[in-house]
Image: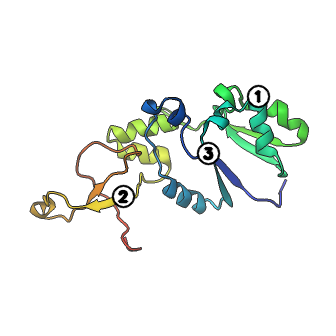
Amino acid sequence: ALVNGVSIIITFEHHPLTILHPERVPKRVIQEEVMDTVLDDLNVDYILRLPMNEELLQMSADEFLDALCRGVDVVGIAIGTNFTFGAKGAGNPQLMRERLSAKGIHIIVEPLLSTDEGPICSTNIRKAIEEGHMEEASALLGRPYQFRGIVIQGDQRGRTLGFPTINFLLPNEMAIPPDGVYANRVCIDGAW
């Protein structure tokens, strides 16, 4: 059925490990500002980033669902089969269905998309990027791998190769490919 409503992507400002085990925080496969552009291209109406803090981590699964639906007319929620929520990840798709279906909220549980190499997930995307398999990473992402960074002065070796080169100060939080020379498309001041 068609619904006259808005779409909202709900995500978290940071990975839970930023509080639980900062030394184990995985590298990101997408920057926040790039994510905004990707979601905008998908015609998502709003992005809600929940703050990652102790209060959120200690919230029970039921408290999380109550907070999620409080004060808004939720028609449906779409999640992946591996989605967990609430303290220690106690909530799962089955619990969400049990708690919210009675309120008339339609729960859509989507299986993870997969390839011959396994499920499409941030772990496998990160691995492909960090091993330098950029074609595979782009295929898993469904778009080219991209980041925004600051151009810095390099060793000016590109001049000896006959190709213009750009050196980037890579964002520390991002999964990055190994050292090397990569062909890229670069947008500078709106021009590719």
At mark 3, the secondary structure is: loop
At a point 49% along the width and 29% down the height, the residue shown is 21
Q: Residue furthest front?
A: 54
- Can residue 172 be seen? yes
Cα–Cα gap, marks 1 and 3: 25 Å
Q: Secondary structure at mark 2?
A: loop
Q: Secondary structure at mark 1?
A: helix
Q: Disc 2 or disc 1, which is closer to the eye? A: 2
Q: Are marks 2 and 1 in contact (CB under 8 Å)?
A: no
- Checking the image for residue 51, the label placed there is 3
The vertical placement of 173 against 153, above or below, is above
> Which one is nearer the viewer's eye here, 25 or 175?
25
In primary-sequence order, the first of circles 3 and 2 is: 3
Q: Position of residue 147 (x, y in %)?
A: 41, 55
Mark 1 — residue?
94
* Callout in the foreground (3, 2): 3
- Residue 190 to residue 27: above or below: below
Q: Percent x, y for residue 4?
A: 83, 61
Give the amino acid type for the residue marked by disc 1 in the picture: Gln
Instruction: Write the residue at 35% across / 64% down.
Output: 186
Amino acid beneath label 3: Pro
Q: Quadrant of residue 40?
A: bottom right
Residue marked by disc 2:
149
User: Residue 62's image quarter?
Assistant: top right
The image quadrant where one finds the C terminus is bottom left
Closer to the camera, 140 or 68?
Answer: 68
